[in-house]
Amino acid sequence: MTLSEDLRLPVACPACGSHVMRVSSIKNPDDRVHCASCQRFVCLYHEACTVLRKGAGSESEALIEKAFNRGH
């Protein structure tokens, strides 16, 4: 059984609108990132990292992500 971790992305799940995503704790570039709410495939981990590096669209969104993703 693989353990997983949650992270918050500035881009919401297209199915349910949640920003909380789940990825394997191993975090290989090709690991699949799924919505933590509806389990829909959203992107690959390396794509999520690119989105996180680009940052949020607003300052308030950036503060939420910084707080949520503190340990990642």
Image (tube, rainbow, N blue to C red):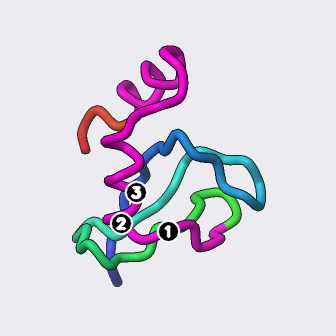
> Residue 36: x, y in percent?
58, 58
Query: Which residue corresponds to the image point at 43% horizontal and 75% vertical from the top-left?
Result: 32
Amino acid on which disc 2 is placed: Tyr
Pointer 1 local density, CA inside 10 Å: few below 14, some 14–19, many at least 20: some
Rendered location of residue 61, percent (x, y): 53, 24
Left or right, 32 with respect to 19, comes to: left
Return the residue at label 2. Answer: 45
Q: Kindly indicate whether the residue at mark 2 contacts the one at mark 1 (C-beta within 8 angstroms).
A: yes
Which residue is identified by label 3?
48
Q: Could you give the CA–CA distance between mark 2 and mark 3, rounded to whole angstroms?
A: 5 Å
Tell me if mark 2 has few (under 14), some (14-19) or many (20+) residues whose alpha carbon lies within 10 angstroms of its own: many
Give SS at disc 3: helix
Could you tell me what secondary structure mostly forms the magenta stretch? helix
User: In terms of sequence position, does the residue under pointer 3 or pointer 1 come before the other?
Assistant: 1
Residue topped by disc 1: 43
User: Which quarter shows the N terminus?
Assistant: bottom left
Residue 61 among those drawn in magenta: yes
Q: Which residue ends up furthest to the top in the rendered image? A: 59
- In this view, the residue in front, 59 or 37, is 59
Identify which residue is drawn at 59% across, 45% down: 19
Q: Which amino acid does label 3 sit on?
A: Ala
Identify the magenta region. Answer: 39-68
Side of 4 where 8 appears, left or right: right
Q: Are marks 3 and 1 in contact (CB under 8 Å)?
A: yes
